[in-house]
Image: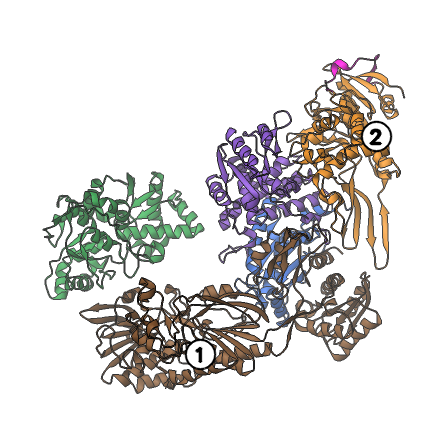
Amino acid sequence: MARIGVFICHCGENISATVDCSKVAQVAATFPGVVHSVDYKYMCSDPGQTLVGNAIKEHNLTGVVVSACSPRMHEPTFRRACAEAGLNPYQCEMANLREHCSWVHERNEKTDDKAIDLVRMLVEKVKRNNSLQPIKVPVTKTALVIGGGVAGIQAALDIANAGHKVIMVEREPSIGGHMSQLSETFPTLDCSQCILTPRMVEVAQNPNIKLYTYAEIESVEGFVGNFTVKIRKKAKSIDESKCNGCGLCTTKCPNKKNPNEFELGMAKRPAIYVPFPQAVPNIPVIDKTQCTYYKTGKCKICEKVCQANAIQFDQQDEIIEVPVGAIAICTGFDIKKADFFPEYGYGKHKDIIDGLQFERLASASGPTAGEIRRPSDGQIPKKIVFVACAGSRDPAKGIEYCSKICCMYTAKHAILYKHKVHDGTAYIFYMDIRAAGKNYDEFTRRAIEEDDAKYIRGRVSKIYERDGKLIVVGADTLMGAQTVEIEADMVVLATAGVANQGAEKLAQILHVSYDQHKFFSEAHPKLKPVETNTAGIYLAGACQSPKDIPESVAAASGVAGKISCLFSNSELTREPLIAVVDRTAPPQYSSCTGCFMCQSVCPYNAIEREEINDRNGNLVKQLAFINPGLCQGCGTCVAVCKSKSIDIEGYTNLQMYSEVDALLNF
Amino acid sequence: MKLGFYPGCSLEGASREYNESVMAIAEEMGIELVSIPDWNCCGATAAHNLDKELSLSLPARNLALAEEAGLTVLVVPCAACYSRFCATQHELMHDENLHKKINGIIEKEYKGNLRILNVIQFIDEFIIDKLDDKMKFEFNKKVACYYGCLLVRPNKVLDFDRTEDPQTMDVVMKKLGADSIDWAYKTECCGAGFSVSFTETVGRLSGQIVEDAEHRGAEAMIVACPMCHSNLDMRRPEINKYNKKKSDMPVIYITQAIGLALGIDRNKLGLQRHFVPVKLKDFKPYTKKTEVENPQKMEVE
Amino acid sequence: MEEIKKIAKQLLSENKIQMVIGFEKGTANKVRPAFFKNADDVEKLIYNDTCIHNLALYLKKDICHHIANVGIIANPNVVRSIIQLASENQVKEEKITIIGISYEGKCVGILDFKAAEEFAKTQPKGLKPEDRAFIEKIQAMPLEERFNYWVETFSTCVKCYACRASCPMCYCGKCNVETNNPQWIPVASHKYGNMEWHIMRAMHLAGRCINCGECTRACPVDIPLNMLSYMLTDFVMDEFHTEAGLSTTYAPALSSYTNVDKENFIK
Amino acid sequence: MEILNKLLDKTALSTLIERFGKAGKEVYAPVKENGITDFAKVDTIDKIDFECIATKQSAKSLVFPRVEKILSFEKSYDDISVKNVDINAFPEVVALGSRPCDAAGFIPLDAIFSTDHVDEIFNARLKKLTVISISCKKADEYCFCTSVNGNPGNTAGSDILLTEISDSTYFAEIVTEKGKAILDANTDLFKDTSAIDKTPHLADVKQEFTAEAINEKLNNLFESDIWDKQALRCVGCGACAYVCPACGCFDIQDENKGNKGIRYRCWDSCGFGLFTLHTSGHNPREKQSQRWRQRIFHKFSYQMVQQKQFGCVGCGRCSRACPADMNIAEHLKEISIN
Amino acid sequence: MSEFEPKIVAFVCNWCTYAGADLTGTSRIKYSSNVRIIRFPCTGRIDYMLLTKAFASGADGIIVSGCHPNDCHYTSGNFHARRRWMVFRRLCDFMGIDTRRIIFSWVSAAEGAKWAQIVNSANEEFKKLGPYENYHKLSTQEIFE
């Protein structure tokens, strides 16, 4: 028989000013199953908690209802107090007499009645509570970092330096990400590669970090602390253990006219290539779609010149399976290309380029060795127009958000241009200048005041080519929306930062949520900015939303901190309030019929197919099985299950049914 | 084949040649265009600035009449009428209460089952595939296809072609053998309704259009809107005044261009009615290609 | 009919299947489901337009459990049922041989699941005019009258569960009415128990019912309970544009969602 | 009691019904509603459907309702109070126009509820029930009463049996004391007559087998594969049991609201898998064929042993109600010649 | 005679509406005391049979409330719930169950004032509709005296 204790808290006067607490305690004492019912001034105080604990021991209570504030406030407190007194903490429930009663109603009999109802409801519930044990899961102290840009590098180094293993997976042949393509960085104008490459090398050399480049995530299974990840290591056609990075193959390759991705198509590269000179690892890759041998079956010049015998034409993709305990998503962003803009000719004009292309033009290691030259004819542009918000903040283009980094890099571009083309003029069309950040506004002022950038507040309606010039037609809203026409030599579009291609697919593999722009969603915009809704998976950098370098690095260190916390214990403790599928003796095994409609509603892929076999190994039945490590306890499966084969601890069918019954049938 | 047809006021007035050429090519292709019985004004261009219900009721009545007459496809050559019809269809289908209200006003029930086509869509759907068999001449000229504003905007309502850089007319002209140029003024404003009130403005706006087309070597401009045509053709003196040079580049309707390729008599196409004389000649006789190339339709965003 | 027999005989004699579910002559002028285990028996097989029983039902009964491959004479309702059952992981393609028959009674031969999906799509379902009229008649009633109509109609229900037993989609080993802790639905066939049972049944079939009408045909007291699930099928089609019984990878209406589901009723 | 022979014309029957009403008796008779004929309360003769061969459901619910309260209870803090149902409050009921097979059905039902333990509630209801049956002049392909010791003019189970001998007149046989009480209270409505041969006025139901032969056969058939064969198409619903006039199985359930509740019994059926399912998950009647076997064995073997009574009256309702056309007469015949 | 006070049961999710109702309390916004809140982990957990159970047990009105679309703590529970409610409402309507007595709402953890307003307007609406005797009678007649 149930032996329930009811504890009515006055909360000073917060409850007792409106609710007649002693009356509620007296009435509650008459509920069947209640053996002890008291009221007290501050139940959450030390003496209050002792009161509960002593009553548990004295009256041999099997359940406790603390009627006080919201369970969202003090449920953990009282569950702990119960546990200390030897009662299973999940035999404690709270009736919300403060937030849901005393604070929102007047003092009268009806309010007392409501308080009594609420207590009765929880008494009936707690009678049906199950004693539960917290779920313990072991932790694999290896982190997976997806993406080798600046965020991934930072996260990997921080985790590795905390003493944990890290596996880094990068899609491209080299780590470095977009930052390695940048010329100089705002607001300090220090050389991007100068600050990044040492960290890239550090990644390669850190004994705690295992690096897989030219590799992608194939699948992720499991749950926090216990993920199993399959990595597809794409065939580089190079034996990495033999290659010494001499580069002879790349210089001897006869097929050199392939668009260079790193230079955004503004230069060519051979079919066997290292993306850029400082690449990590410094090992070439054969582009199978371009290589003459793969296309025609003849050539193999690289194989002939390679003294290390590292070329392997028959190399296949390799699937590597690794166990990891936590995952950091650092897959970064992409930008809209110029062909996204119909009003700017869908990228028809070679001299309308995007911001990233300008970075390469301005980079000393770029295709023009740092000289600003037009891609069409190599001339130095004397008049250059920068268009900020190309796509960003434009609902008509489906991109409502601000890409955040463009104001700053456009100012930087104008400065760099002026430094390189002294007699040139830079015009910048902008909507607003958003330069919130340390030394940021000073930087844009410098572009305007020292480097003579002509800022025009207004948008560009169209750009067309006429007689070799690019006619930029826009409005100057500070001059009464007057039409402005500039005959420019070159136009740079600060195109919107968008989610990386493949982000959606990755999100689906990882079962994390993403927004309508395919940026990954954080668990809470303020308080959980680097967590996802899936425990054990974290976010850093521009895969979440456009971010600049300092922000990405800060987030990456945040993620590293989170993962280090997770790895600081060998076991994880989780609330056991999860769904379970019923089990009975053979031949039924369970009332589950294996329709798996629960599987399609589970947001966490926690529901697995369990096969029941007879002694001869024949399949008898397929049943749903809920992985306790993955289930987060939403209970949607419970409501969907037609045969009522699933129930959820803490909110069981019997408990909820009894609550309704207790509220209405007395 | 019978299709519904809404002439509207311009095709019976200032733009008779448009009507004539539409009818001529339809006849040639064996298509019967049936006017909506008892049609009324579409409400352009003034009604939607004055009274929203009126601006919807006028087209709605026409649409309801067409539906009553058992029509399922309605060809609307005038771009202004087309725009009003599409806007009405869009609004009524997206607002149940408004739909009921308008039905009450026109005392008819428009169910919304009509497909409304502008002339280019009409050509694209019913004519372009038959051109190979019927073409007698190639339209071997450099042309600038001019769309204006109403054919492609607003994109949400019309869902026709790419707003900023439409292509359907170019596809048709290329099919006729023309060299359709890439230019910057395809969808710029011609001055539209200011044709009568502010001729100077029309001169400036249309002037820039004519100038760019001519600058890029176009021998003719191709249009599909009566208002564009009258601005670019009838207002040529104002245009020339603005451009400070004389231009005699003719402006012809796309239906007239097709008519010419089909070898239809110039007068039957109304070419004699233009202010800027249409002197185009020396069309190359057309021989059917053995390999039938499918006219490539540009991806519409 | 001869063609059906021919196929059935051949399949049985080649031991590709071990049983055929079809029809034979029943009491008086009726037909009844029949099970043929050898080729000679098949002579008794008949098929005519009174063969409306949804035989797919038997695929989930114990008689089929230990049979390696069951042949089934499948009119479009049966085909749809099998596809729906497959989408719910209840039947396996390798254990079933579908001998398809169109609404007109034309044999379309043996269908694998892929072909069955294609076939089902060519066989129109939708509401019959009389069903629609019935539904509209109910809808036209004032709220109170509607409630009383159903309470009275269901008051004759004896809870024999013939509706459940003859529904191919009601395959749960333990039905919700049989769970008793808590007792979701009263066991008794009083008005309240009956109402709750029929609400529950209709909800469980929402988006899964293939409108075969077996429940009502089976009902010994002729309750038009199929109208509930027919109405919901119609609703699901209108709102979610999905239809049961057409695809083995179907996501049932009530365990899927879209971001644009209507919420004009939510404050 | 020796049977008394009387004549009752239809106008007199009508008067009789009105008098029952005035005397506070509830009259139940076959009534056609929405195309279905079933027993329903009537107050005038014109509501009665005399043409129906057999109502969809039997008359058993008059003594053994679908759902029947046994007791009510209330829990307080430390006590539970229980109140039995008041059996004296049951109304006097007349079943009018039932068929001889319906009437015969009360006999095995009574046997079930009165062997070993005498069920108070059932017997209280039965005591207050008067059965005025009407002989069958029509039968259909499902009827087989003659094979199970019945016939279309059988008086067993009836208090009065009426046989229509002309358009206006019934030949009335007063079978029991309860019947005689009605006669005595309404002597003005009954006319004297000598015995009349009913045969020309009765339906012809061919005898296909005998219940005794089935009983005999069953001794050796428990392990036969005939059950598997016959039960193949059985869908496992309870329709047969629920329409059967002789099926008496029930379930006992509590239904509560908060601390108050009632205990009731309601019909159950051996056709359901759940009927014998143990909590452990084991089910002694795991297959549908075993449940079918149970149904036949119970009616033709066990009941005979325990209650000296067959549990089938040959009304054919189960066959009519079966969604899979399980024709019990056909199957019994098959058993009899097995 | 005192005014009719409807019995209202609110089925709410833990993360949004329950927290929102907490905020109503913290903000000391007053609302009708006729409502009783039952906490669920998520709207996806709320079984429609509990709604009919509530009516049968004597509730005159029901409020079902959870997180706004895209705000579900469990990402999609409210979407599944929304669809379930659409179908359930349709069925109720068809069966003559008064859907005006089931009020669905999205109330976030920040919408304390909205919660009070939802309860108060529901209370007024249910008062107008009166006791839900149709359904109450259904569950008590025949069996319970």
Question: Residue D178's x, y, as percent?
Answer: 86, 26
Q: Residue at x 46, y 63 (%)?
A: A505
Label 1 lies in what chain?
Answer: A
Q: Residue at x 24, y 62 (%)?
A: B188
Discs 2 and 1 lie in a common subunit: no
Q: Which mark is residue A150?
A: 1
Identify residue type, mark 1: Val
- Image: magenta residue range: D188-206
Which residue is denoted by mark 2 in the rendering?
A: D309
Q: Which mark is residue D220?
A: none
Colour for chain C in the figure: purple
Rendered brown, the chain in question is: A
Rendered orange, the chain in question is: D
Q: CA distance from mark 2 to mark 1?
A: 91 Å
Quadrant where the C terminus of chain D sits is: top right
Give the main secondary structure of the magenta stretch. loop
Question: Residue D167's x, y, as percent?
Answer: 72, 15
B235 sits to left or right of A590: left
Rendered green, the chain in question is: B
Residue D21 visible, this orientation: no
Colour for chain E in the figure: blue
Q: Is residue A448 above or below residue C92?
A: below
